[in-house]
Image (cartoon, coloured by chain):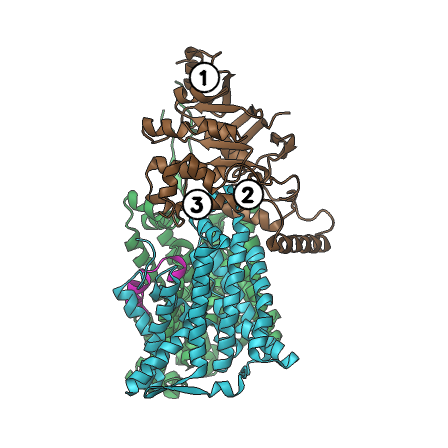
Amino acid sequence: MSLLETRSLTARYGDFQALFGVDIRLEPGETVAIIGANGAGKTTLMRAITGVLRSAPDSILYRGAPIGDLPADAVMKRGIAMVPEGRRLFPSLSVEENLLIGAQHKGGRDFGDALDDLLTETGRDLRRAFFGPHGLPPRRPGLALGDRLRAAALGPHGLPRHDAGPQHTGAGYWSLETVYDLFPILRERRHSPGTALSGGQQQMVAIGRALISNPDVLLCDEISLGLAPVVIRDIYAALPRIKASGASVIVVEQDIGQALAVADRVYCMMEGRVTLTGKPSEIGRADIHAAYFGAAA
Amino acid sequence: MSARYSVTTRTPASTGALIAALALVVLLALAPLYASRGLIQDLFFILTMLTLAQFWNLLAGYGGLVSVGQQAFVGIGAYALYGVVILGGVDPVPAILLGGVAALVLAIPTAFFAFRLQGAYFAIGTWVIAEIARLGVAQWRSVGGGTGTSLPRDALGDMMLVEGIAALFDVRASAARDILAYWLALALAAGTIAGIYALLRTRRGLALAAVRDNTEAARSVGVDAGRMKWLVFLTAAFGTGLAGGLIYLQKARISPDAAFSVTDWTAYVIFIVVIGCIGTIEGPIIGVLVFFLLQSLLADYGSWYLMLLGLIGIAVMLFAPRGLWGLISEKTGLQLFPIRRRLVGGVLTSKEG
Amino acid sequence: MIWVDTILQGVLLGGLYALFAAGLSLVFGIMRLVNLAHGDLIVFGAYLILVIVSALGLHPVVGALLAAPLMFCLGWVLQKAVLNRTLGDDILPPLLVTFGLSIAIQNGLLEGFSADSQRLSMGALETASVAVGPVSLGVLPLLTFGSAVAVIVALNQVMYRTAIGRAFRATSDDPVTASLMGIRPDRVFATATALAMLVVTVAALYLGTRANFDPAIGPARLIYAFEAVIIGGLGSLWGTLAGGIVIGVAQTVGAAINPEWQILAGHVAFLVVLLLRPRGLFPRGQ
């Protein structure tokens, strides 16, 4: 059983279809690279896996369980953490607070869960009372925040409970201290606003923020984008320690050289489809060129 | 080969609607011939609320300016009328125009302040200005201060046209005044709808839609968003002031709390527009009919009625944000006042490459 | 000397307005939602305390303590079931829904309690005063002001020293990325509104003990609160206190000149600040 797997994954933004039946998998301990030009669908794939875009339940399997329709917070709590494209640090938070945000949402139920369940169940009972056992037709999950909030507030309109299934406990190697050991500069800048840092340092915060939840899967979206080569080298130097901590990694890269250097396997995407798969040692330059830019090139 | 294309906003339904609308206006104009005085008063109420709703819809639905302070213009229009009638001895009918002008004058500093605020803060900002206007008018002793006043009997008696109408329909002067007010309300409502429709069909109207949808993008294609906002705000203020003057001419009694009531002149109006359909001309028409129906049905239930109205407003916004007309036109594709430009005629062919 | 007294009374009155405004400021700061029913919720809170106090024969402060958890849950449910559905780029849905809520609460209270004025009685405390130098200050206004400061200190501690405060700020910055970090924005917003309703309960206690109240006074409190928030600068809680003080002082000074000018003077002060400092006295960010 793969750790993470997509099966004929499709995704669309309104009328625009961005993914057409994507199949990728990640085995435990692996590092997989996803390469492709701008608009190939790499970031959409990441958004689908993390639950920012909802998909059909069975189109994404994590440890064999369907997670395609889970919201982002539930996916994260299962143990899939994301370093988003453009780093997306929280400007109102200091470096340390940005890191702590990743650590604070571990498993377990709290007051909010209890009240939430009460509300959801009351809503369901009322709906049953008014509309019969089948209730209103399920809403289409959308990608707008309002839609997602609505879906969350409405609860079980065909959406499974968020916290059903195994919760990732978050116990493990990564803590503020081990993140600071990995990126010592962050310890010095711990009280600065996250956005006051250089691009490379911000990227380190974003990686640390994802690691600190001790994920089993770490998704890195374009972590070298806009950074100087020497900074990229520093950041990728952290990868072996990240893998040693037990995380399997998917890196999304436009930099083919970098991707081939770190990956166990590579997927190349073009126009919403996987056009090439293989080990870096097995695929040649011409194949990649064709898969990257299209056959005619 | 020249395929003949033309850009039109007309739909078959809209042509029918135009004829029906003209017929309806004629029918309504003749209402004093067949309708009771009570019905005339109800129609007056519906038409004035419709006018207010159309102007609020122009502001919020087309201009993106969600004002909660339109009662300022109703009140100032009404008080301007009372002022010039009581203090200046002006005939009340032309004084309605002065009510509109007074609202326009108040709208200039109001816009100056309120345009510094965005979104929700604009809404409450306009409300604050309406409160200031209310408190200010309450200091105006010669029109009754905080307790209000009535239109003097002789001013009402000498009102232009009343004598002729009384003779024509063989009714008492008070009924003739209602008929006059009703005709004025009909003219105002019909003129408002025609005027807004005409505005929306011009290039300016297109620009308005562009500003509402995206101020930045509209600016980048050369639409002066600031100027459009001013235009819409001042137009709405003027029209709302006219309606305010007319409403209180018919009521013949005024007080600051009533004339500047946020519930009567803004909350009701907002519910009319939202229940109907915001951002369409049809919406307020449907909305005002539903509103009147609800009010007549629930008139005996006092504040339960208002509570229900509030809850209906919430429900519509949450579950049918396009209102009743939105549901109808979604199901049927019907557009009575189309403003969307469509390409018709000819055959679209794609170039072979 | 009479001016010193007037201004001090105004500062203390400003404490009351800051209490009205703090919940509004918190909710706006976190989810950019302006709740037009805020004033009516304060009035609702006052009636809730009144019902508890008269049913159980308790002191209003104890009544408020009992009302607080109810208001907290009300805030949670309101945000989760209704207001979360209105959030988005379009400002119209939240405005209209909260406006509808305002009308519904006002008329519900009117139906339940009639238009008669009510009051929460604090007994001897209501008339007690202390002499500070030449001026005499009411104990109740002093308590109000102290509570306002305490509420703002507490809210700032929550915002900047706790995990939920971090989640508030993170979600306010970027709800999508926050959800990638395991935060549920809908729940964070519900918690924020629930917290704001605790502040509303405190505001309701002082609304009810300092003067008479009836179902119709909510919108005016909303306007004072709103003016305080704008004068202070959006999202700054200490700024909100300053804004409340500006309104309070303007009102007492206005009333000292002519009793009919009290409310008008507050509104005019608001317009003057808006004219001179469109972003408020203490704007957050650049």
The three-letter code of the residue at mark 1 reads Ala
For this rendering, which residue is in front, B16 or B222? Answer: B222
Point out the image quarter for the C terminus of chain A: top left
In terms of image quadrants, where is residue C65?
A: bottom right
Shown in green, the chain is B
Where does label 3 land, which residue?
A98
Q: Residue at x 36, y 77 (%)?
A: C11
State the hue of chain A.
brown
Horizontal relation, residue A40 to residue A59: left or right = left
Where are the magenta residues, as a range? Answer: B103-122
Return the mark for residue A291: 1
Q: Earlier in the sequence, mark 1 or mark 2?
A: 2
For mark 3, name the chain.
A
Q: Nearer the viewer, residue A136 or A218?
A: A218
Q: Colour of chain C?
A: cyan
Read off the chain for label 1: A
Q: Amino acid at mark 2?
A: Asp
- For marks 1 and 3, the one nearer the N-term is 3
Please tell me how crowded label 1 is: few (under 14), some (14-19), or many (20+) other residues with Cα within 10 Å.
many
